[in-house]
Image (cartoon, rainbow, N blue to C red):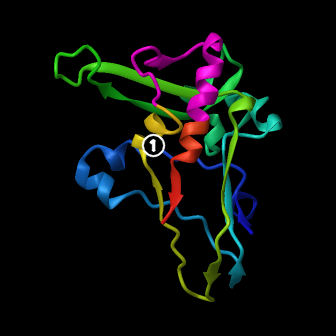
Amino acid sequence: TLDNNVFSDVEYVDLRDSHQTLEGAQQGFTLSLGEFDAGTYDGFSFHIGLTDEQNAMVPTDFDSENPLSLLGEYWNGWTSYIFAKIEGKYEGDNDDIMDDPMALHVGTVAARRTVDFDREIKVESEKTTTLEMTIDLRDVFEYEGTYDIDATPQIHHLGQTPKALEVADRLAASITLD
């Protein structure tokens, strides 16, 4: 199985710039994961989140080249990195204007999720292999029932850990390998 241990310990994926417009979102975001041996693999997996050891550290423990050095991706109050952010505006007050803010931030070791794709992947020598994945935010809000965005439009404190874990489950379930 191809897994994230083949590629690197940590990747910081920021979709904001590539997804500012519908055209940009349709074009997508490319993350190069490096080289690996040619062959046929029986699957692909990665984690959303960090190991216990990684999450126990703080941004100042890392040099500036490391993605874990980003101060804005660490919650002091939670003593955890933020593993995922879904931010934007939605129409919540029945005025037909998308102006109500939402900021669903997911962190803490309990929110680490593994995304597995049990599907044959063929990698040929000296060729680029592309795996196309889709994160469908509609699925985040509709997975196993509807997420009540009006009740919890922001996740920012430890008392909201159950909601953060719910969003982590929904996010992991929304990722498909095309």
Amino acid carrying label 1: it is Asp
Say whether residue 158 is magenta: yes
Is 111 left or right of 87, judged from the image as shown? Answer: right
Taking 33 as reference, is 162 above or below it?
Answer: above
Q: What residue do we see at 68% from left, 42% from top?
A: 113
- Tally of numbered tags: 1
Q: Is any atom of residue 22 visible in this view?
A: yes
What residue range appears in magenta? 146-168
Judging by the rendered image, the residue that carries numbered circle 1 is 139
* Closer-to-camera residue (109/18): 109
Q: What residue do we see at 61% from left, 87% from top?
A: 124
Task: Give percent across and percent down for residue 98.
Answer: 23, 25
Is 125 left or right of 137, judged from the image as shown? Answer: right
For label 1, the crowd category at 10 Å Cα-Cα, with few meaning under 14, some 14 to 19 and many 20 or more, is some
**Quadrant in which the N terminus appears:** bottom right
Taking 60 as reference, is 49 above or below it?
Answer: below
Task: Give percent across and percent down for residue 14.
Answer: 47, 44
Say whether residue 33 is magenta: no
Which residue ends up furthest to the right in the rendered image? 53
Is 147 left or right of 161, judged from the image as shown? Answer: left
